[in-house]
């Protein structure tokens, strides 16, 4: 991408902070940032429907040029990629969105146009339940679809847990920031962020010296949603940033999933309400997620089903696996939650055990989260 177009894109992005959709419309009508900037003093000659506010904003193009040039020099000195919309490396999923950023700043190694991209979001006050769900979901997802890219916001709670679990499982993970790449908030996540740069990346639409203001987190959420194929809400109160991301994802036509929680739990209320109102599909495990997304061609589970699971008459079972089998022998076709109670396991642990049993051909999953012991 030529430097002129990059700098002009940065100028327009800086000027359009409060009118992003309008500036994006001008950009798309004109065909490039350079065309907008070079015609900024008479923009209505080429785009008659340009608003008065936008024509006023464009009068400051020359003032913003030194800022853009200094930012580009900083990026080049620090290995930060400046991605404009015409760049092949710009996330194509995000480019389709009506309020896509004109410029992204990226420090990392992951391909933002990976064939499989999901975001995992939720409350900053995650419980042990959420942490166990993330641990098992991400580890299983990595086995089913090892090329998946995990995106989140590097915040406390669900976000950082998702990033760390992805790293531990060998998956690449990208954090979308609400500030520039000259700093990191929260600072205690810097060790994780450093790992992500070599096994994923850090992404933002904000120039350096941009504070992590409240409005920037809301803007950040649209990038998390737009860059992904699907949004996975793990745990959320009745109101929160995770629900905002899920709502934005729905508006973009993305698939939205939510893990259910116990009725009455504060940080399950948002997920339960979303499922109840058909705003998200109920999610219990990675296998059902992969199936719902149509990704089974990538999955270990699909391979096992296609080739056929060679089941021994008496396969070696762990103590936990045998406990589940004993419960199903007594009362077959049990719902996941009931089975967890009768087997004396947490839902997250049971999910992992059931996966192993399915791989061994001992059980199979039925509709509605029910499991059947094969004869």
Image: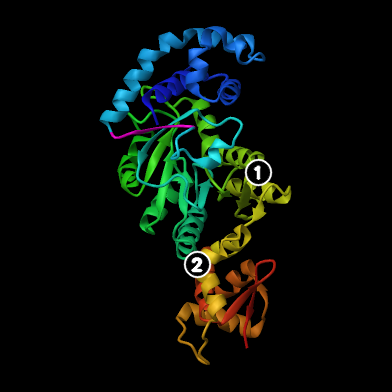
Going from N to C along the chain, the mark reached first, 2 or 1, is 1
Q: Is residue 195 above or below residue 305?
A: above
Q: Quadrant of the C terminus?
A: bottom right
Q: Quadrant of residue 182?
A: top left
Magenta extent: 79-85
Helix, strand or loop at label 1? It is: loop
Q: Residues within 10 Å of mark 2 (few under 14, many from 20)?
A: some
Q: Nearer the viewer, residue 129 or 366?
A: 366
Q: Quadrant of residue 243?
A: top right
* Residue at 62% across, 68% down: 336
Give the side of residue 39 with respect to residue 82, left or right. Answer: right
Q: Quadrant of residue 88?
A: top left
Residue designated by label 2 = 349
The single residue placed furthest to the left in the displayed view is: 77
The single residue placed furthest to the right in the displayed view is: 277
* Residue at 45% across, 44% down: 112
Residue designated by label 1 = 253
Percent position (x, y) of residue 193? 34, 42
* Residue at 39% across, 22% down: 4
- The answer to whether residue 330 is seen in the rendering is yes
């Amino acid at each position: 991408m030529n430097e002129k177009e990059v700098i002009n894109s940065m100028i327009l992005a800086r000027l359009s902070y409060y009118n992003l959709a309008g500036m994006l419309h001008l950009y798309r009508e004109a065909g490039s940032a350079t065309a907008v900037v070079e015609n900024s003093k008479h923009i209505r000659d080429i785009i008659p429907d340009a608003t008065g506010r936008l024509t006023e904003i464009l009068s400051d193009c020359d003032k913003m040029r030194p800022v853009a040039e200094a930012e580009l020099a900083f990026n080049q000195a620090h290995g930060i990629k400046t991605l404009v919309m015409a760049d092949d490396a710009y996330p194509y999923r995000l480019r389709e969105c009506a309020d896509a950023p004109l410029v992204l700043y990226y420090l990392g190694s992951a391909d933002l146009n990976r064939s499989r991209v999901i975001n995992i979001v939720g409350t900053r006050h995650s419980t042990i339940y959420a942490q166990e769900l993330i641990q098992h979901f991400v580890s299983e997802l990595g086995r089913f679809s090892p090329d998946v890219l995990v995106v989140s916001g590097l915040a406390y709670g669900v976000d950082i847990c998702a990033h760390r679990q992805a790293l531990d499982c060998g998956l690449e993970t990208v954090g979308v920031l609400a500030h520039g790449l000259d700093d990191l908030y929260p600072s205690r996540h810097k060790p994780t962020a450093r790992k992500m740069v070599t096994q994923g990346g850090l992404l933002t639409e904000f120039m350096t010296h941009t504070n992590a203001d409240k409005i920037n987190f809301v803007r950040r959420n649209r990038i998390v949603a737009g860059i992904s194929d699907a949004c996975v809400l793990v745990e959320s109160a009745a109101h929160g940033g995770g629900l905002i991301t899920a709502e934005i994802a729905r508006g973009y036509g993305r698939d939205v999933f939510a893990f259910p929680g116990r009725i009455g739990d504060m940080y399950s209320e948002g997920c339960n309400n979303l499922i109840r109102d058909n705003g998200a599909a109920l999610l219990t495990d990675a296998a059902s997620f992969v199936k719902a997304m149509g990704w089974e061609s990538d999955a270990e589970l699909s391979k096992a089903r296609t080739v056929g699971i060679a089941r021994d008459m008496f396969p070696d079972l762990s103590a936990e696996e045998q406990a589940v089998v004993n419960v199903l022998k007594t009362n077959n076709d049990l719902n996941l939650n009931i089975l967890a109670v009768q087997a004396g396991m947490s839902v997250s642990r049971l999910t992992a055990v059931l996966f192993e049993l399915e791989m061994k051909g001992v059980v199979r999953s039925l509709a509605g989260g029910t499991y059947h012991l094969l004869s």
